[in-house]
Each structure stands twice: as C-alpha cells, then as structure tokens.
Image (tube, helix red, strand yellow):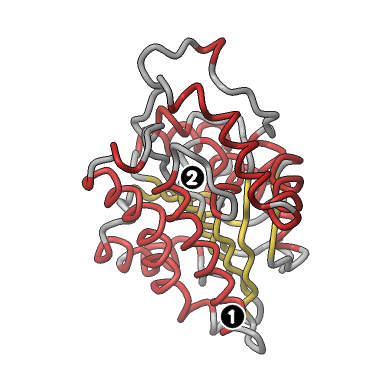
Amino acid sequence: MKVRGKVIVVTGGGNGIGREVVLELLRRDARVAAIDVRQASLDETASIAAAGDRLLTLECDLTDRAAVQALPDRIVDALGPVDGLVNVAGIIQPFVRLAELDYDTIERVMAVNFWGTVHTVKTFLPGLLQRPTAHISNVSSMGGFLPVPGQTAYGASKAAVKLLSEGLYAELLGTPVGVSVVMPGAVATDIASNSGVGAPAGVDAADAPKFPSTAPTDAARIIVDGIEDNRLHVFVGRDSRMMDVARRIAPKGATRLIYRKMRSLLDA
C-alpha cells in the first residue's frame, strides 16, 4: 500500500521508533494519527513534525480497551477514514531471569505489548476492511523469534505479536488488508528508560553488552518501505537478519551466542 495521501494510525508515536515512523509517513505525504500514553511526548513529536492539520495527536493507554475503541471516531472526524495501522508501542522488562520477575511486571509487559496490539487491531480492522486498500504493521522483535536471556517475558509477548500477525495475514488473504510483522534487532532508542527499566545495579555502561544498532530513522524507513512493498516479514538491522538465519541453522548455537552477550547483565 502506497502511503501517500493515506490516513495512518501509529501507536507509540511520542518517542523512539514510533516517532520516526510518524515523521517518515509525513515526509511521504500521509496523514497521521499519532497515539501515545504521554501527551508531552506527542507534543514533542508535533513540534518536530510541524505538519499542521496532517498530524493528529491522541493520548491513550492502549491497555484500556474502552479508550482504544473510542479512537476511530475521533480520527475519522479529524483526518478521514483510516487506511493503515502501525503498532509500535511496546515496553521491555527488567534484565532479570524469569524466576526473579514478579507477576505484576509480567502482566504489564503482556498488557502493553500483546493486549495493546490486540485492542488496536480489533478496533481498527472493521474500518480497514472497508477501504480499497489498507495495511496493518505490527512491531514484534528479534526477541520474538530468538530467546534473549533476561527478556523472557518480553520475548514471549513479542512472539505472541509475531504469531498474531502471521495468523492475521492468513485470515486476510483475499481482502484489501495487507499485514506486516516487523522484527527489529538493536535500535538506538530510549526504550529502557521509557519502560522504567535500567541496567542492573553494579553494571557500568562500559561493561554492558554491545550490539550493532540501527538508527531509529533507518528503522522507520525500513518499516514504511515494508508497508509499501506489502512484505509479511520486515527485518530491521543486520543483527535481526543474521540471527534469523542463525537460529534456523543452529538454534542452540544462536541461543548460546545471545547468552554470552547478555551474561554480564544476568550475573549482576
């Protein structure tokens, strides 16, 4: 689906990859409804975009189903019928083993990452099916297909998003709605601080695991290209593409590699 002139909803539009997706869509002459849990972050996005009436910002907690269900009418009134949905909003967990992770944190991660995606997809899909062409793009993670020690609950939530998206793709074959699932590797964003998560005590920044990272602007371009090319799987970053191959060829070896990278955080 070419995004020029289309109305596209972006969750997590107040920071990180979500903000850059908003800006990339605006550069390609789309109209965008940016959604985030923090209005102050959305205001920053709007000030950077300077897009006038092509950008609508809406504060919303995606874990609140009723609040999400109220969004379409507000967006249609301001921008017109919705043609696309890009689910970027997500949080990570503290860098600890599952045995040390409390239930409240696990439930919060699932509520934001999985149920937030379910809420928006279920809410916007009926309208998308009425459009001549439409698209849903859900951001999963490299951690959604490769186990990352210390991010097990997060990975489970993103694996759920991946399978949800692939199932949705199968169900929507023969309809006007395309589906993409995005699997970023390391992207240089503030997702840890935005998730309320810091490095474990005793880990110096210089000793933290180093991964090659993708710039958020590049991640956004890849995501929007994936929408326009109607790709099912969209890999963001060399690390994601390489580890997808590695885990299929040698799953145990790929898992051990990631463990060695993460061990300093787990042992802190």
Label 2 Cα crowd, 10 Å radius (few <14 / some 14-19 / many 20+): many
Q: Which residue is mark 1?
A: 131
The vertical placement of 205 against 108, above or below, is above
Q: Earlier in the sequence, mark 1 or mark 2?
A: 2
Residue drawn at 76 percent across, 55 percent down: 249
Callout 2: helix, strand or loop? loop
- Depth check: give the residue in front, 141 or 228: 141
Q: Judge from the rendering whether residue 126 lies leftward or rightward of residue 178; answer left or right.
A: left
Residue drawn at 61 percent across, 61 percent down: 181
Residue drawn at 36 percent across, 66 percent down: 119
Kindly indicate whether the residue at mark 2 contacts the one at mark 1 (C-beta within 8 angstroms): no
Res 181 label: none
Callout 1: helix, strand or loop? loop
Q: Quadrant of the N terminus?
A: bottom right
- Depth check: give the residue in front, 144 or 266: 266
Q: Pinpoint residue 79: horizontal percent, then vertical percent.
A: 50, 62
Classify residue 43 by image quadrant. Answer: top left
- Depth check: give the residue in front, 191 or 39: 191
Q: Which residue is mark 2?
A: 13
Amino acid type of the residue that numbered disc 2 sits on in the rendered structure:
Gly
Q: Pinpoint residue 48: horizontal percent, then vertical percent.
A: 56, 32
Q: Pinpoint residue 122: horizontal percent, then vertical percent.
A: 40, 74
Label 1 Cα crowd, 10 Å radius (few <14 / some 14-19 / many 20+): some
Amino acid type of the residue that numbered disc 1 sits on in the rendered structure:
Arg
Q: Quadrant of the C terminus?
A: top left
Residue drawn at 62 percent across, 36 percent down: 186
Q: Residue furthest bottom?
A: 174
- Quote the CA–CA distance across marks 1 and 2: 23 Å
